[in-house]
Image (cartoon, coloured by chain):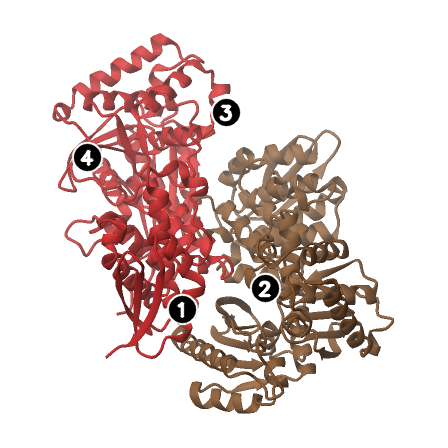
Chain colours: A brown, B red
Amino acid sequence: MNPPASRRTAVIDLGSNSARVVVMNFRPGYSYHLEDEVREIVRLREGMTEAGLSDAAMTRGLFTLRLFRRFCDSVGVDRIIATATSAVREAANGPRFLERVAWDVGLSVRVLDGTQEAFYGVLGALNAVPLEDGIVLDIGGGSAQVSRVRARRFERGQALTLGSLALTERFVRSDPVRKSELQAVQQEIERQLDGVPWLNGERGPLVGLGGTIRNLAKIEAARRRYPLQTINGFALSRASVDETVRILSQSPLSLRRRLPGLARDRADIILPGALVLRGVMERLGVKELAISESGLREGLFFEEFWSDLPYPVTPGLREFAVLNLARFYGYHEAHAEHVRHLATRLFDQLAPLHGYGAWERELLRAAALLHDIGMAIRYNDHHKYSQTLITGSGLPGHSGREISLIALLARYHRKGVPDAGEYAGLLEQGDETRLVRLSALLRLSEFLERGRAGVVRDVEARWDTQGLRLTLVADEHPTVELWDAQRNALDLMESAMGRPVVLDSRLAV
Amino acid sequence: MNPPASRRTAVIDLGSNSARVVVMNFRPGYSYHLEDEVREIVRLREGMTEAGLSDAAMTRGLFTLRLFRRFCDSVGVDRIIATATSAVREAANGPRFLERVAWDVGLSVRVLDGTQEAFYGVLGALNAVPLEDGIVLDIGGGSAQVSRVRARRFERGQALTLGSLALTERFVRSDPVRKSELQAVQQEIERQLDGVPWLNGERGPLVGLGGTIRNLAKIEAARRRYPLQTINGFALSRASVDETVRILSQSPLSLRRRLPGLARDRADIILPGALVLRGVMERLGVKELAISESGLREGLFFEEFWSDLPYPVTPGLREFAVLNLARFYGYHEAHAEHVRHLATRLFDQLAPLHGYGAWERELLRAAALLHDIGMAIRYNDHHKYSQTLITGSGLPGHSGREISLIALLARYHRKGVPDAGEYAGLLEQGDETRLVRLSALLRLSEFLERGRAGVVRDVEARWDTQGLRLTLVADEHPTVELWDAQRNALDLMESAMGRPVVLDSRLAV
C-alpha cells in the first residue's frame, strides 16, 4: 500500500502578542512534520482601548499577515487555515479589521471564541503528551484557556482574560515590578479562577502549553542543563515555577532579559503569566505539570491530519510517534522491521535472563525501527546521527528518559561500549544496565540482518548456567552473518548476559 | 529544468585486505551521495602461495560477495560495478576463482590491472581535493599505486607490491616488530620505488588515499582533537607520520589496538604502509600531503556519474561540492539564491569597509546557499543543524578551515553572537572578525528575504564616517522586512561595520 500523497497546510495564528505561520508537510493519517515557520511579534493588544485595536497595531497586523500570505504563496501550500484569538475577538473594531485583511491580503481569518480556542489547544496537547483525564492550561498573550479532559477528549473549557500581555498592560507599570502590582495581578487571577466552578475538586494531572509555559520550562531546562533539544513531555515542578517567579519579581527588565532560557521578547511580560500558572497549580494541588510543545496551531492542523478518524487524536500516541519519525527520515522499512522482529524474538526468549518487561520491550522495538534513520544525514557515522535525530525530535508521548534511552540504543547499534554520556542526568537507577542489555540484543539483530534480505528468519535460544546457545534459522547457510555477529556483537552479548554465547545455525524447513 | 532522475549504482571492490560495497544514490551530473555501505575484512591475500589464493580465503571471498549481491538486490540498485585488485590479479588461480563467483553468485567481476587501479584512484581523488599537477599515492592491502597528475588529469601510474598486508605477510613475524624486520621492509620499499624512474624530480604536491593513509590521518586527527567528522582535505604532516611510525614500531599489537584513531582491524598491518608513505614523502621532499576520502570505488562511480563530460572530473570542484550538498538536503532554491544575491550585493558594495576579497566572497556565497539545509532535519534549531550537516559532509575541495567558516556562517544566520566554539582550533588569525563581518551580511540578507518571495530586490549602500545607509529596493513597501532587519540584524551589522546603520527603502521602478 502506498502512503497517501504529501500535502502542505499552513496554519496562521494571529495572537495578542505574537503572530505565527507554520507550514506542516504531511501525508494524511500517515506522517507529518513542521516544515517551516515565521514568527513575528505583533503586540496586537498594545494600546487597545474601548474603541478597539489601535491604528499602529492594525498596521502591524496587516503587514504581518501580508508577509505570511506571500510566504505561503512562495512556499507553495495547498491550504491556509488562518485564525485570530482574544485581541481581535475582544476588540470593538475586530470585524472591521478582518474585513480589511480579507480585502487587502486576501486572507479569510476565522475568529475563535474562547471555547474553540481551548478546544484546539487541547487537541494539540492530546497529540503530544499522554493524558487520559486531567486539566490543560494554555497561557497566551491575551487570554488563558483552562480545559478539562476526560477519556482523552476535550470535555469543557473556557478562556479567561489572563494572558501575559493583557495582565502586564493592565497592572504593571514599574521596573522591577512592585509588590503592590503583583498583588493586584494575584487578586485578578484568583477572582477569575473563582469564576471557573468546575475546576474545584480537580486534582490534575496538569498539562501546560503556550509560549509562557514553554518559556518557563525552558528556563528550568537551562538551569539544570537539560540535554534534549525538545521540551515536549518535560516535567516542570512547582518548586521550579516558584523559583522562577522569585527571580523574575526581584530583577529589573535589563537582568530578566539575560535570564538563560527566557526569550528576550517575552522578558517584559512573562511574570504575570508565571503567576497564572502558579495559581492554577495551587488550586489543583499538583506538584508538577507536563509540557506540550503542541498547542492551538497544531490542534487546528490535527483536525485536518486525522480527518478520517471520528475524533482527531492520534490512536496509539507513542507507536505513532516512532513511526512518524521513521517515515519522515525515509527509513528502510523491510530492514528495520526485520531487525525489530529478531530483536523482539531475542527479548522474549531471553526474558528469564534479563528480567525486563513490557516497557523495555517497547523501547527496544522503537530503537529497532529507528536505528538507521541517521542515514538520512550521512552514511558515515549514521549511528551517531540517529541519536541526534531522535533526541532532537521529541517523540510525542515519551518522557525525556525514554527518548534518551531509545536514542542511546540507536547510537550503539553498530559499535562502541554503550555509555549514557550527556544523557546520564535523565536516566534512573538501573538504566545503564538496561542500556547494555538492550543494546546487545539490538546489535546482534542488526548483524544478523547484515545483508538486508531477511536471510536469518529467526533465532532460537537455549541456555544453562554454562552458556547461551543461539541458533540462527536461515534460508541458506548464513556464513557471513555468523562471522559478523561473532566479530561485532558477541562481546557485548556475553557481557550483557553474563555467560559465554555460542552461535550456530540450521536451515529453515 | 527538472533534475535528471535518481539512480542507484553499487560499486563492489574486492581488495586484498577488505571488501566493500558502496551504494551511490545519484542524479547523473547533478548530485550524488553515498547511501549505504558494507565493509568486510576478507584478508584474501592471507595464506596465498605460488598456487594462488588459499581455499579458506576463496571461501571468505565467495560468501562475502554473495552477501553483497543479496544486499544490492535488497536495496534495489540499478547497476553493479564489481572489481577485484591485486590479490586476484596476482593469484595463479584468480581466473578460476572469478569463474566460480560468476557461477555461484551471478556477479561478473572485472580485474583491474595496476594502471587501471591507479587511474580510478586518481579519478576519485581529483573529484575530492584540488590538485592541478602532482602525485597521488594510494596504499591498499595488496598493492600501492603511485600516479602522476598533469592539468587535473591522470597522466601515468603504476601499482607496486607495497600494500600494507602484503608487506606485513612477507616481512613481519615479531610483536613488537623488530628493527631488522623494519629494515627489510624499508629496503624493499626503496628497491621498488627505485623502479619508478619518473618519480625522480617530482616535488609534489602529494595527495594520499586508501585505508592505510586515511587511518594515519585519523590517528593525527585524534591526537589533535580535530573537530570535523570528515578528514577529506586534511593536511597530514611529515612530522606527524614520523611520530606515528615511532609509536607503532615501539608498541606491541595489544597497545597498537588501543591507539586512538586506528581501526582495530588494521592495527596489525598498518606499520609497513606508514613506511611506504614516509618513503614517498622523502623522495618527493614534501612536508605534508592532502587526504582524499575518495579513491578507487568513487573513481569507478564518477566515471558513470560524469559520463556526459569528456573527462570524468568535476568541473568547478568547490562550487559543485556546495551545490551537491544543497541539493541532497533539498534546499529551497529560489530563497537560497535570493539570499545569496543580496549577500553578494552587500559584500561587493561594502568592500571598502570590510576589505575582503574573492576568497571571503566565495565563503559567504557558499554559506548563503547552504544556510537553511538544516531544515531537512528539523525546523526548530535548523541553523544548528545546518552547521552539523556542513561540518559532517566534508565539502570536497575545501580545507577544514573553510568548512568550519562556512558552517559557522550558516550557524549564525538567524541569531546569536558569532563564536568559533569548538572550531576555533581550525581558524587562523583574523577569522573571528571575518566570521562576524560575513555573518552580519548573511543575517541581514536573510531577514530581507523573510517572506521568501524576493520582495526586496536589491540593496544600495552609502556611507560616510558617521554612518551607513542601506536602501532596500522593493516591489512594494517592505514594512515587515524593515522591522525584522531592524530588530534582528542591525546590532550585528553595526558592530561588524563599526558605525551606525540606517535602513530605508524605495520602490523599484
**In front of the other: B184 or A424:** A424
Q: Chain of mark 2?
A: A
- Give residue A263's position: percent from left, percent from top: 57, 60
Relative depth, front residue between B380 and B181: B380
Residue type highlighted by circle 4:
Thr
- Whether residue A285 is visible: yes
Q: Residue at x 34, y 59 (%)?
A: B327
Q: Indicate the chain on which mark 4 is placed.
A: B
Q: Which residue is mark 1?
A: B450
> Is A376 situated above or below B425?
below
Image point (52%, 77%), residue name: A12
Q: In front here: A359 or A384?
A: A384
Q: Amino acid at mark 2?
A: Arg
Name the residue beneath numbered marker 2.
A266
The residue under label 3 is B258
Residue occupying image coordinates x 80% and y 78% = A196
Residue B104 in the image: x percent, y percent? Answer: 39, 44
CA–CA distance in space, label 1 to label 2 = 21 Å
- Circle 4 sits on which residue? B115
User: Secondary structure under badge 4?
Assistant: helix
Whole-number angstrom distance, CA of label 1 to CA of label 4: 54 Å
